Image (cartoon, rainbow, N blue to C red):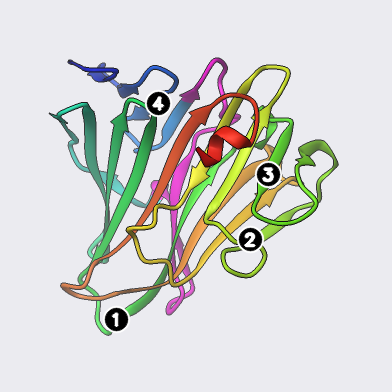
Amino acid sequence: MQIGASSIATTNDTWVLKNTRLRVIVSKTTGQIISLVTDKELLAAPAAIVLVDTVDNKTLTYTDGVINKGSTTSSGNRAILTYSLVYGNSYTATTTLTCTPDAVRWDVELSTTLTPDREMKITYDLPILSSADEAFWAAPGLPAKIADMRTQILEYRTTTYLPWVCLYGQKTDHGLSLIAPPDVPKPGLTFFMETADNPKRMRVSNHHLRVGASKPTKSSLFLVPHEGDWRPGLA
């Protein structure tokens, strides 16, 4: 179905969301984002959600969950995909991807049947650093060449003053801003730029999240495509 400048389609194996500048392909089997394209493919490997239960010191990835059948809807100029990963009898992570004409919003709501309440981390794991040449965030002395960077740990309100990191290439004239939206609480938010990993990756971690029976918690991330400069990311 076509929704203004946003659309969503299904194949046997995938869901495909598109706007005028970004295409997102999601696996129906794993819930991973297997392709993220502006004018080029940005992902060196699939992107996914990683959960950490800090009480039990347990990490949960897509391999630990079973995906429920997804649903697609439309509302105005938005195309919306919703699906859940169920982790045994402990956690359910419901993902909603909302495609608008200029961005994709990636929401995760985490619920549990466990007691007592848990402290959780919800991390967006995106192997995208190899697709860009430069990075910018709200701190002095930038932009920085990604090829020359060591691993960066950017804590919101401490080492970066906005919940935003911009990755871009001037020669290819493509950019992608990762923004944690202001309407979702951020008791802890850290951007990890893992330049020593293979592939190089960006991890956006929401931590100190409290979840309990009938007490879900949420995280959210905007993926905003734009021209090959950091300034459009602030527009």
Query: x, y (%) of residue 87?
Result: 29, 57
Is 41 a magenta residue? yes
Residue that label 2 marks: 160
The three-letter amino acid code for the residue at tag 4 is: Val
Relative depth, front residue between 174 and 112: 174
Q: Earlier in the sequence, mark 2 or mark 3?
A: 3
* Mark 2 Cα-neighbour bin, 10 Å: few <14, some 14–19, many ≥20: some
Q: Which mark is residue 117?
A: 1
Q: CA distance from mark 4 to mark 2?
A: 28 Å
The three-letter amino acid code for the residue at tag 2 is: Thr
Q: Earlier in the sequence, mark 4 or mark 2?
A: 4
- Which residues fall within the magenta stretch? 36-63
The three-letter amino acid code for the residue at tag 3 is: Phe
Query: x, y (%) of residue 11?
Result: 26, 16
Residue that label 4 marks: 24
Q: Earlier in the sequence, mark 3 or mark 4?
A: 4
